[in-house]
Amino acid sequence: MEILRVIQKSFGVLLLFTSTFAHDLSNSTAPYIFNELYSLLIHWPNNFHPNGHTIVPGILEPYTLLYHARKDTANPPPSPEWLAFDPEMSYAVMATKIPGPTYMYTYRTTRPAKILYFNGMSAAWGEGWLDTQYTVITGMGKTNGSRNNDVSLWDDYGRAKGLCEWGQHRGFEGIVRMNAGFEVIWCDFDSSSLRFVSSLNITPPGTPEARRSFPFPHNAIQHTGYRDSAEELPLRPPDRGPGRDRRPGGGGDPGRHGPWGMITAPLAHSGFLEWMRAATRYKSTTQPHISLYTHQMVSFYHPRYHSLYPSRSGKLMQEHFIWEHVSDEDVCVFLEELDSVVRADLQGTGFDWQAAALDVVAFWSDRIAQMQNLLEGVNRTSNLTQVVTAVQRLSYSPLDPFIAYGEALNASGHDIFFKLRSSPSLLDGTIAPNTTAFERCTYSSTEFLVDPELQALMTPQERVLLMSMETVLERLCTDFGILLAESTDATDSDSFSILVSAWHDRMTSLMGWLEWSSWLRCEELCDLDSVCSMPAWPITWGGGAPGTPGRDNPNIDFLKPTCRKLNMW
Ligand SMILES: *[C@@H]1O[C@H](CO)[C@@H](O)[C@H](O)[C@H]1NC(C)=O
Ligand SMILES: *[C@@H]1O[C@H](CO)[C@@H](O)[C@H](O)[C@H]1NC(C)=O
Ligand SMILES: *[C@@H]1O[C@H](CO)[C@@H](O)[C@H](O)[C@H]1NC(C)=O
Ligand SMILES: *[C@@H]1O[C@H](CO)[C@@H](O)[C@H](O)[C@H]1NC(C)=O
Ligand SMILES: *[C@@H]1O[C@H](CO)[C@@H](O)[C@H](O)[C@H]1NC(C)=O
Ligand SMILES: *[C@@H]1O[C@H](CO)[C@@H](O)[C@H](O)[C@H]1NC(C)=O
């Protein structure tokens, strides 16, 4: 009898679930697009989801300081070359591991410079991380019949040239990417958008002399510090990054022996640790010197790219590999979209989509984690009455702005959220259409965009973001609405344990669907001589560590942030 009631209840929930989701969310790319949107220019989400599928045009702000370290005094350097936002990055790359003198060049932008931004850990050498760039450079997918585009991880200058070639024709001055720091591939050092500030011989005392000269441009030393063929450095790119430490989750030790195991000048010993410090600055805030045109965001997560369906079906975002799956046709459509976006340069609605996505994450993220933690902790000794009450309060709080309880104090939890319609009064005296609390919740970020004037301004790229935002909110509002409805309407304490277990499943499924990096944190408070750091290539990424997620190994525990010491004794 009791079991039957519970089954009926679950069945009701099931019906509700399918009837409130207008589309099949299990096959939706909305959560991926949402992740790409909220992660733009932020470190941790891009460490967590390194296989960026997204390109966004934008500008590098005027008067931004940029750094470039090199082993010779060529001024201007041959183009293209790399500029870092953090001097620690330039220093670590050139002064700590490579013999011979180091010169630090400082630049400042003179005006807004158009840049093209690649999301993900896009400046790192790893399988999947460079895939979007490969499509831009080659204009096709990796394989087609017997063709197999051979792409060398080593060929950073080749990539830089290819990307600049695509971008310069379209007015871009640089390509912005991320590894353990943000960097710009600057396409033309003769451009008046960049003012040379200074160059200084910063070689730390005790730096070994170069055993042979380091010719520039380009063919010997990569900006990352690797070289193709030199006795001082390893000859082969590491499989997933230059880390030597193969402890699971240990990451490469960025200290004395550095990722390359080279002995450095005594003063430069902490160079890589200081880079790690810099890398944690923007772990959850955007790099502040770049403005992106999110209304022009182009993504391989657009649902129309059918060739990519197998690349993500049943997989974590860390396992989504574009390059080997994408058809030439889909690459062509993607590049045509990017090209037309750049050429048309539409202004869009002016809505700050990333801010809206970050608002959603900020509003929901810790509540979801708290709810999951609460439900996970339930055991045979728990007082289920208290658990149900806690679930009711915790699910009610994010929904309360949308619930017109004052109009129906006696309504059931289900009716008040999913069924009863009410019309919020508007200040200008007009009457808003009757909506349910569920609808008000789902459209809370985007309802204003129904305005015909804004509809006319909306770019096709914004429509994709709109779909993604509303789908993500629809799922959040549904899942929390069901928890609220069931916890409010549950009267029979015999049903509590089945409900609690179903809620736990629901939260687990929600978190798996969202894949937010916002749940990452160091479990302990880091000491003042430490930073809370995620594995980030190349400084703290244990190359080929058993826990490295990605192909054949979806062990995302590897990516957990930990406190890492900034000193070396
Ligand atoms: C999901 O999308 C793919 C590609 O569009 C399609 O082939 C597949 O049938 C869809 N699956 C479901 C369950 O809708
Ligand atoms: C392979 O190349 C041919 C000829 O360029 C093209 O028509 C076809 O669409 C390509 N197939 C895939 C799967 O990319
Ligand atoms: C049950 O949960 C409580 C509180 O979360 C905890 O203190 C207790 O040790 C748990 N008991 C068992 C048997 O796991
Ligand atoms: C469980 O919690 C409720 C509400 O706090 C309380 O009234 C009830 O006595 C508790 N039950 C037990 C067995 O402790
Ligand atoms: C709610 O229900 C109670 C008890 O049935 C009743 O006395 C009260 O008038 C109802 N309140 C409203 C606002 O309908
Ligand atoms: C909204 O619903 C209420 C209650 O059903 C009804 O009284 C009101 O006329 C409706 N308003 C509109 C604009 O449909």
Image (spheres, grey):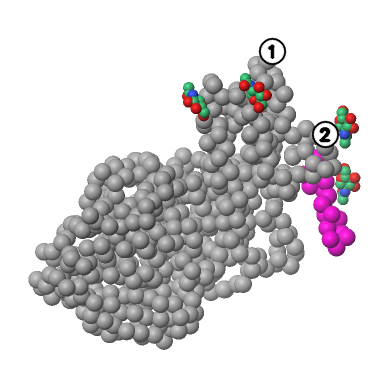
Residue depicted at x 78% and y 32%: 412
| Residue in the image at 15% along x and 61% along y | 263
The answer to whether residue 53 is seen in the rendering is: no
Q: Tell me if I can see residue 232 in this picture.
A: yes
Question: Are circles 1 and 2 on residues that touch, CB within 8 Å?
Answer: no
* Residue range (magenta): 420-436
The chief SS type of the magenta part is loop
- For the N terminus, the quadrant is top right
Where is mark 1, residue-wise? 1
For label 1, the SS is loop
The extreme top residue here reads 1
Q: Is residue 345 above or below residue 42?
A: below
**Residue depth check, mark 1 versus mark 2: number of the one nearer the observer:** 2
In-image side of 528 versus 362 (left or right): left
Quadrant (top left, top right, bottom left, bottom right) of the C terminus: bottom left
Q: Secondary structure at mark 2?
A: loop
Query: Ligand 5 near label 2 (Cβ, under 8 Å)?
Result: yes
Relative to 15, does residue 340 appear above or below in the rendering? below
Q: Where in the figure is residue 314, as x and y percent of width and height?
A: 46, 39
Q: Residue 299 shows which numbered tag?
A: none
Q: CA distance from mark 1 to mark 2?
A: 27 Å
Amino acid at pointer 1: Met
Q: Is residue 381 left or right of residue 415?
A: left
Sequence-wise first label, 1 or 2 = 1
- Residue at position x 60%, y 56% from top? 359
The image quarter containing residue 374 is: top right
- The label on residue 410 is 2
Judge from the rendering whether residue 102 lies leftward or rightward of residue 495; answer left or right: left
Badge 1 crowding class, 10 Å Cα cut-off, few under 14, some 14 to 19, many 20 or more, is: few
Residue 418 position in % (x across, y down): 74, 39
Percent of width and height locating residue 7:
66, 21
